[in-house]
């Protein structure tokens, strides 16, 4: 039994063994982990980073993306000999655990990773809600934590010192979008908003409402849908009855694919349809087909950006090539953010010359670096304040960046109502 548990623990870790497939923890294995592997890990001089993810449940597609980003970073680090810690090379080991798309379990998973798996550092769970909930744990134990997928300012308003995030606030997405629509489509006056009733989707919908009103647009509808909703017909019928010029929808990838299909079923159209952040994913385009055309969105990164960084990947181009070589696909912002989260830990550890948590935390707080993700500086709350997120639109089945001007690939287009 002990041998079986040991094997399961080993295969749940990624990074030390290139190409290893992460598997889920079993409770018995987790309980045995400290006794079985504490001395072994120390002997290998491994830096362990905990990664609680929703590997099963409705958020599993997002978890897969994060895992791919983490694994790519870890493999590159270890292929280069590891992280330089005061002149000593230490390899990286990512310890995964599944919290089944359940926020209370995400908090429990974070605590187990710290107290039982003895990880040195932590990646936050997926999304703003789970990241905020789990941040109380990392703050309690003084564990530097990077959130690769949490943009809501409510995550960072707790006065915590150990939490850092790679997404700028939500209004950095809604304001540029609104400016573009007002400029390109002056006849657009009526906005309908539909939001998943969850921290990030609801928060960005609320920012959209503010952005619209600031530009004298009329918000004719603001509806919420519950997590795991499968039938949106009533809410969509309500939106259709309001005859909006701009339909703005928030949610996660499965939500948005379902919503777009149900919009098509009800023949709901508008000159502008925005979904945050469905068009960032190739899966959205593949699943919705012609229904994806002219859907607009915004996110925190796009392969079109061209940065020359000092991280393990160097340039955006190099990162995209490395991702394509490993996964035979283009990276999206969720995957890239997960990779840069690892790269930022690496930079901070090397600057600190130590894996002491307080020293690494201070190094993160004082970072001012260029990466393949873009310029990284963290504000007083720990949230990044140095990025200008791209705005994009699906045109002829492809994602086209329409803002900012430096990386613009095409012009914003209106749909037909």
Image (tube, rainbow, N blue to C red):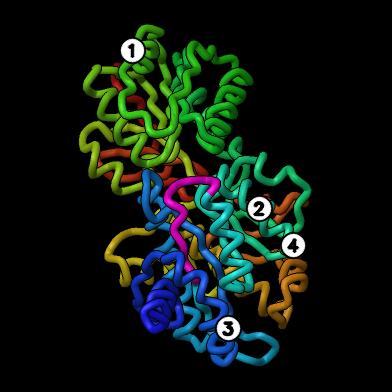
Q: Which residue is mark 3?
A: 38
- Calculate the distance from the C-alpha at mark 3 to the C-alpha at mark 4: 29 Å
Q: Earlier in the sequence, mark 2 or mark 1?
A: 2
Q: Earlier in the sequence, mark 4 or mark 2?
A: 2
- Calculate the distance from the C-alpha at mark 1 to the C-alpha at mark 3: 58 Å
Relative placement, left or right, of 220 versus 244 is right
Residue 294 visible in the snapshot: yes
Q: Earlier in the sequence, mark 4 or mark 1?
A: 1
- Calculate the distance from the C-alpha at mark 2 to the C-alpha at mark 1: 39 Å
3 or 4: mark nearer the eye? 3
Residue 134: where, in percent of width, then height? 61, 52
1 or 3: mark nearer the eye? 3
Query: Dots 2 and 1: beta carbons under 8 Å?
Result: no
Label number found at residue 135: 2
Label number found at residue 365: 4
- Calculate the distance from the C-alpha at mark 4 to the C-alpha at mark 1: 48 Å
In terms of image quadrants, where is residue 112?
A: bottom right
Q: Earlier in the sequence, mark 3 or mark 4?
A: 3
Q: Which residue is mark 1?
A: 237
Secondary structure under the numbered disc 3 in the rendered image: helix
Q: Which residues are magenta?
A: 95-104
């Amino acid at each position: 039994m002990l041998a079986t548990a040991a094997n399961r623990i080993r295969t749940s870790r990624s990074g030390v063994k290139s190409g290893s497939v992460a598997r889920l923890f079993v409770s018995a294995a987790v309980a045995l982990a400290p006794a079985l592997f504490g001395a072994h890990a120390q002997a290998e001089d491994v830096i362990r980073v905990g990664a609680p993810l929703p590997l099963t449940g409705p958020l599993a597609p997002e978890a897969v993306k994060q895992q791919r980003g983490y694994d790519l970073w870890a493999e590159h680090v270890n292929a280069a000999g590891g992280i330089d810690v005061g002149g000593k090379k230490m390899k990286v080991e990512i310890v995964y655990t599944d919290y089944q798309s359940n926020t209370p379990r995400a908090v429990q998973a974070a605590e187990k990773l710290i107290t039982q798996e003895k990880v040195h550092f932590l990646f936050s769970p997926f999304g703003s809600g789970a990241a905020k909930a789990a941040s109380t744990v990392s703050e309690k134990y003084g564990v530097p934590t990077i959130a690769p997928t949490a943009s809501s300012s409510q995550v960072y308003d707790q006065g915590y010192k150990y939490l850092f995030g790679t997404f700028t606030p939500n209004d950095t997405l809604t304001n540029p979008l609104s400016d573009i629509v007002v400029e390109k489509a002056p006849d657009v006056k009526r906005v309908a908003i539909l939001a998943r009733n969850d921290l990030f989707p609801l928060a960005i919908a609320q920012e959209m409402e503010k952005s619209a009103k600031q530009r004298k647009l009329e918000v004719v509808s603001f509806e919420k849908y519950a997590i795991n909703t499968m039938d949106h017909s009533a809410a969509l019928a309500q939106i259709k009855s309001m005859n909006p010029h701009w339909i703005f929808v928030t949610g996660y990838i499965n939500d948005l694919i379902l919503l777009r299909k149900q919009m098509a079923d009800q023949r709901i159209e508008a000159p502008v349809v925005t979904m945050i952040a469905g068009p960032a994913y190739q899966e959205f385009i593949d699943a919705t087909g012609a229904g994806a055309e002219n859907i607009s969105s915004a996110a925190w990164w796009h392969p079109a950006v061209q940065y020359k960084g000092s991280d393990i990947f160097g340039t955006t181009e190099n990162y995209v090539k490395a991702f394509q070589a490993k996964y035979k696909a283009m990276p999206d912002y969720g995957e890239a953010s997960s990779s840069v989260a690892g790269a930022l830990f690496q930079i901070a550890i090397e600057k600190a010359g130590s894996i002491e948590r307080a020293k690494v935390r201070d190094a993160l707080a004082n970072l001012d670096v260029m990466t393949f993700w873009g310029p990284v500086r963290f504000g007083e709350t720990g949230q990044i304040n140095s990025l200008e997120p791209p705005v994009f639109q699906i045109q002829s089945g492809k994602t086209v960046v329409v803002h900012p001007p430096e990386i613009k690939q095409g012009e914003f287009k209106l749909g037909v109502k």
